[in-house]
Amino acid sequence: MIGIDILEIERVKNFVGNDKLLRSIFFESEIEYFSKFNNPCERIAGFFCAKEAVKKAFCCEDNINFLDIEILHKNSGQPFVVLHNNAEKLFKKNNYKNIEISISHSKTIATAICKIDN
């Protein structure tokens, strides 16, 4: 199953400095990652797209929310997904084997794609 999302980076500018909004969507680990960059909006938009792509790969399960999906990076820089709560339960219930994510952005657009293997 595949999910994809795309977002104009301009649309997340109001996230910067809005801790309540950020914490409603992102884990502390993700927020710390964003803070490492001079322009965190590109990363925020990319992670938002990644979470949406994961939700879509699960066939738009309504009971999966943003805080069920955590995006981290390997030492190599490759992003990976850690599932929590409802997303983790659904993954196990359906005996899915693997979940992969790819995130990319330009100066104006962010995108992500997710693949879940049976």
Image (tube, grey):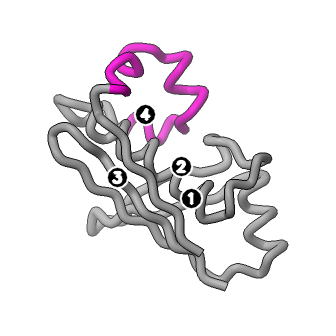
Which numbered dot is residue 54? 1
- Note whether 40 is above or below 56 in the view shown: above
- Note whether 13 is above or below 79 in the view shown: above
Query: How packed is label 1: few (under 14 Cα within 10 Å), some, or many (20 or more)?
Result: many
Is residue 48 toward the left or the right of residue 24 in the image?
A: left
Question: Do the CB atoms of the residues marked 3 and 2 lie less than 8 Å apart?
Answer: no
Q: Which residue occupies the foreground of this view, 101 or 5? A: 5
* Residue drawn 27% across the image and 68% down it: 76
Q: Which residue occupies the foreground of this view, 50 or 61? A: 61
Question: Do the CB atoms of the residues marked 2 and 1 lie less than 8 Å apart?
Answer: yes
Q: Nearer the viewer, mark 3 or mark 4?
A: 3
The answer for how far apart the CA atoms under marks 1 and 4 are is 19 Å
Badge 2 is on which residue? 52
Looking at marks 1 and 4 on the same chain, the residue that comes earlier in the sequence is marked by: 4
* Residue drawn 25% across the image and 36% down it: 36
Looking at marks 1 and 3 on the same chain, the residue that comes earlier in the sequence is marked by: 1
Badge 4 is on which residue? 31
The answer for how far apart the CA atoms under marks 1 and 3 are is 12 Å
Question: Do the CB atoms of the residues marked 1 and 3 lie less than 8 Å apart?
Answer: no
Question: Do the CB atoms of the residues marked 2 and 4 lie less than 8 Å apart?
Answer: no
The answer for how far apart the CA atoms under marks 2 and 4 are is 17 Å
